[in-house]
Image: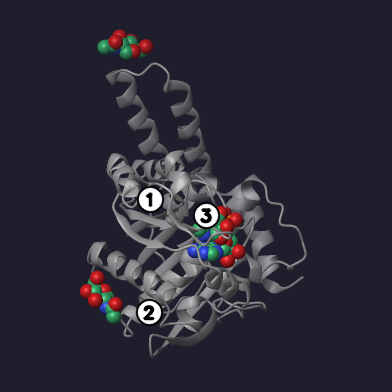
Amino acid sequence: MGSWQRLLLFGGVSLRGAGGACAPLGGRRALVCRRQLSGSENETLKQRRTQVMSRGLPKQKPIEGVKQVIVVASGKGGVGKSTTAVNLALALAANDSSKAIGLLDVDVYGPSIPKMMNLKGSPELSQSNLMRPLLNYGVACCILVYCCSMSMGFLVEETAPVVWRGLMVMSAIEKLLRQVDWGQLDYLVVDMPPGTGDVQLSVSQNIPISGAVIVSTPQDIALMDAHKGAEMFRKVHVPVLGLVQNMSVFQCPKCKHKTHIFGADGARKLAQILDLDILGDIPLHLNIREASDIGQPIVFSQPESDEARAYLRVAAEVVRRLPPPAQ
Ligand SMILES: Nc1ncnc2c1ncn2[C@@H]1O[C@H](COP(=O)(O)OP(=O)(O)OP(=O)(O)O)[C@@H](O)[C@H]1O
Ligand SMILES: *C1O[C@H](CO)[C@@H](O)[C@H](O)[C@H]1NC(C)=O
Ligand SMILES: *[C@@H]1O[C@H](CO)[C@@H](O)[C@H](O)[C@H]1NC(C)=O
Ligand SMILES: *[C@@H]1O[C@H](CO)[C@@H](O)[C@H](O)[C@H]1NC(C)=O
Ligand SMILES: [Mg+2]
């Protein structure tokens, strides 16, 4: 068993004994509460709920050395969240080469950053027993960009099914948030698991987040799944920067006809209804899939392509909307 694994296990044990486990449990209790109340709401109940919610919130603590955290989330799975997180991180580096960027994969159930960034191995431990993120670099839009990454995928065997439950998950998240030596980062991009479960809540409650980017497909918007994601962040007071639309244009494989599934501006109308900005549209493109599947994200490998430019535009929109960093 590697030393990080011992760290993880000990962390799990000590969490159980210490007050630390209050945080996620508190959050869950608040959610349960909400569910029970949502049928018959009046002002009194609403106030009560706010009280319960705020009591459940632990004090947020910034990650040492990290100026701004951007989370990438979605209402449902498989909408291109990890692909967006990876390319957004690289595009942020390409937008301003003086910025230091990190990528944190908190999808403990199905980590994808190791494969998408073509990284593997166990992180070294620093002198103070913190895990060092893995570094890679490439050329994005003519500049050399660096990105350091941390993922549960570096910590568990690739073939081992990741079966996590309750406190185990919380302990793993705690490690990923607190036991990593990021050095000095301007932006940390966090790839979330799909949906609005305990992991998302726990991350939002434990660290200050500058903004959330919601990834969706047009179909997802139609089903209002993206809305659920946005709603959760608003509840925990995380500013939602906007929507990134994946697959906004679909090209029929048979006739090559391009269809805007919701009409050219249908998605924009829907975004208006949901009161969310659109940060950019990512076309459904085979290159994007192939690039991420071989661990060569498109912003690195084909920086001049339209697809890479789509991510660069998203990065510029994100930068524009972020609040100025505290301090
Ligand atoms: N715009 C795109 N065009 C083509 N393929 C894409 C695009 N975006 C993502 N993909 C591919 O779709 C698959 C799923 O994407 P990804 O893993 O980013 O989704 P996810 O939302 O992170 O999924 P999960 O919810 O499982 O974490 C990957 O194989 C990826 O390469
Ligand atoms: C984004 O999502 C689809 C998803 O389901 C995925 O297959 C595709 O690869 C990614 N792109 C788009 C467009 O959705
Ligand atoms: C709201 O609900 C509470 C608890 O059920 C009740 O005591 C109160 O009278 C209600 N208020 C209004 C305005 O209906
Ligand atoms: C970087 O982002 C800023 C802020 O949105 C934008 O004005 C600028 O054009 C972007 N630069 C590049 C190279 O994309
Ligand atoms: Mg993913």
Question: Picture coordinates of residue 239 (x, y %)?
Answer: 30, 52
Q: Amino acid at mark 1?
A: Lys
Residue where numbered disc 1 is placed: 59
| Circle 2 residues within 10 Å: few <14, some 14–19, many ≥20 | many
- Give above or below for 203 relative to 8: above
Residue where numbered disc 3 is placed: 79
CA gap, disc 2 and disc 3: 23 Å
Earlier along the polypeptide chain: callout 2 or callout 1?
Answer: 1
Q: Residue at x 38, y 64 (%)?
A: 69
**Is the CB of mark 3 within 8 Å of ligand 1?**
yes
Q: Secondary structure at mark 1?
A: loop
**Is the CB of mark 1 within 8 Å of ligand 5?**
no
Q: Nearer the viewer, residue 259 or 315?
A: 259
Direction from residue 230 to residue 192 in the image, left or right: right
Direction from residue 159 to residue 230 in the image, left or right: left
- Give above or below for 121 relative to 44: below
| Circle 1 residues within 10 Å: few <14, some 14–19, many ≥20 | few
Question: Picture coordinates of residue 72 (x, y %)?
Answer: 44, 59
Residue where numbered disc 2 is placed: 93
Earlier along the polypeptide chain: callout 3 or callout 1?
Answer: 1
Res 41 quadrant in image: top left
Q: Nearer the viewer, residue 212 or 127?
A: 212
Q: In which quadrant of this rendering is ligand 1 seen? A: bottom right
Question: Picture coordinates of residue 47 (x, y %)?
Answer: 30, 26
